[in-house]
Amino acid sequence: MSDRAGVLDSYHLGEVLKTSARKLGERCGASAVDMLARRLAEYIGSAEDDKYSYIWRSAIEDHEQDAHKDDTRAKLVDAVRDAALGATSTSSPAAMAVAESLLQSPYPTLNRVGIYVCGEHYGTVGAAFWECAKERWFLDVHYWHELYWLINKAFSKFSASQRAQFLRFVEQLKADWADESRQEEWDETHKRDLLHPAFGLGDTEVDEKYQALVQRWGPVRDHPDFHTYSTSGRVGDRSPVASDALVGMSDAELVACLKGFVPDARSWDGPTYRGLASSISAAVRASDDGFAQRIGLFADLARPSQHGLLRGLKERWSDDKRDINWPATLSLVQAIVSSPAFRVDLAADPPKGWEPSVHWVVSDIADLLKSASGTERHLPSELYKSGLQVLRLVLDATPTEAGQSNDAVSHAINSPRGRALESFIHLALAMRREEVAAKLGSGETWVAVGPVFDAELATSESGLNADFSAMAGMYCANFHYINAEWTEANFDRLFSSTSEAAWKCAAQGFAYQHHLYDWLFERLVTGGHLRRMVYSEGLPDQVAERALQFLGLAYLEGMESLDGGGLLSELVAELRVKDLSQLCWYFWTLRGKAASSARTSKILTFWMKVAEQVRANRANVPELQSALSQLAVFIHELTPVALEALVEAAPHAQVGHHGYMLVENLARLANQYPKEVAAIFRAAMSGFLPDYRKEDVIRCVNWLAEAGEVEEAERICNAYADRGSTLLKDTYEALRARQRAPSS
């Protein structure tokens, strides 16, 4: 990049140009665009210096992805863009000449401005794009964002010959990929990405080609208009060097630059290590090869540089869906964690301030390897053991903590050691999946991970490893997948029967379980863990809530009974209002398609059992009655027993703000069971006046009248009027009018 500067700083230059550039283009045409384009080219330097413009300028339009919005280059790009838009707003040979001059420039940034302008003003200058179109625009990352949106915005305006030209570019595409073994895959996924912005815009041939490629290679990435897309980052950290400059440096220059930087402690807004790390990450993500040949250079660099590289590799792999050099990456992290300095830094007091440290690097290693253990996208399976070995060294070097049992999961998933432990579990699962796919036993995986799990469990059971205790609850089903015998034999150690602190951590982890398995429910019940989660004090609410959901699901699946002396029958017998109300809510979430006839029958049996217990105890439990009213959604026949239960629950429905659910279901049943619904509605009004949702109240009253219960309908309307409500005024007048109308 050129070091030339203007009379105005970037801020004031932007203020001047943003209000005048478009008008200059409208009035002066090519002269204004050429003047501003020359100034931008002078600032950039040579065309060779412009080859990484897509790094410092993610999009030609104003976009949140642009990392350098306030520098002079960005202001000049804005000016050229706006002037070109002004000069091409009406169709003329001069407008075409402006677009062609940008498209034919040796500067990629100006080409991108030209592509953008053609997309925005396709009706006036779109033909210039096809006259100047080059194969590299369809291949190179530099032009991707603008090309994507030109296709998307203008495809419906393409002429037949332009559509044919577009398809020729796509069909003939053959890139020079680094890995020849994946040539076909990468060519076809790139073709898929090129067809994506035209998909669904009316061309059957394009749609068929796109769908065939999706079926073969999967859908496009998130944010398909960008090859790299940043979703996080700390605002306000300045870097001593731009990311595109890092990409263009030689190895020696890069190392010298990174080693030579020291923040100026006297400057409150000067460049920081965080800013430098951010630039390194951006450079790794945007570079053609992801620093594939440079990764080893970072073994002896400072922690901020290592953090920047590892974060960039992780985001390139997981967010951008672009490959990285895994062998070199694993060699680097192996060297980092094997170095004596690694343990020394971990043992030292954390540095003051908020600068990347060895603890950040530990988290980076963990996050990177966790991202490489997915089912669809993972590192080569032959490297799993190397990844596990790296994480094992990290775990050996970082001490365990007893921790606070009231926030165990948050600590486990955010602490560097906890993240390394979670990453280890994910890699173990990936390795086990390979064995299962090959129809092998768990021997090889267990040899690699068993000793680590045994060691972690020993410290967990003693109350000195809160992170593993929480992970034990979160991942016990996954442990079972890795080694069922070990998990079942050690279940009462994973949910410790000897350490209260460890058990509470595991219980909090269990709150994140999503699937109920027969073996898991049996172990939770026989060990007393499920009951303990429901009855224990001092645990986060979500622990008891998840335990109750598992209990309710077990009841619906036939693993728990209302009459078998188990936990569910105990809760009913004791009328534990909070727990039974939670079960009502859970059953309500299963309404609709999830509620089979067998499940519906069981849910109603639960309701009637609870209602029977309330009557037997003569209990005053309005909160529970309100919760029970949610289950009206499962009633399709108003039997005498169901009617009795609903009449008892209805007055209390609004206690838990469930009144609208009750009215909605009464409206659903009114036409078939008008007398019963009228009785329930009267019962409801003894406790509250249903007024939400208004349309359901009106629908319910109208259905009562339609079914012959006109007097009941009018009585309800009059009751509303007596209480000062006008909600049913129009409904009442309509009912009376129908009564007065002569029958035909």
Image: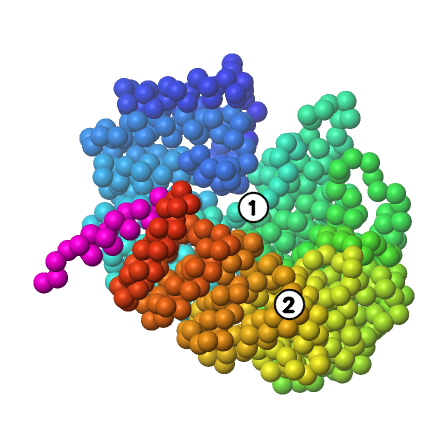
Name which of mark 1 and mark 2 comes first in the sequence.
Answer: 1
The image shows residue 487, relative to residue 660, as above or below, that is below
Q: Which residues are magenta?
A: 726-744
What residue does disc 2 label?
Answer: 618
Residue 315's spot in the image, x, y percent?
60, 51
Residue 349 or residue 240, whichever sits in front: 349
* Residue located 52% across and 20% down the image: 11
Residue 567's spot in the image, x, y percent?
70, 75
Q: Secondary structure at mark 1?
A: loop
Nearer to us of marks 1 and 2 is 2
10 Å crowding of disc 2: few (<14), some (14-19), many (20+): few
**Quarter occupied by the N terminus:** top right
* Residues at marks 1 and 2 touching, judged by CB atoms closer than 8 Å: no
Label 2 sits on what residue type? Arg
Residue 180 or residue 631, whichever sits in front: 631
Residue 256 or residue 309, whichever sits in front: 309
10 Å crowding of disc 1: few (<14), some (14-19), many (20+): few
For the residues labelled 1 and 2, the Cα–Cα distance comes to 57 Å
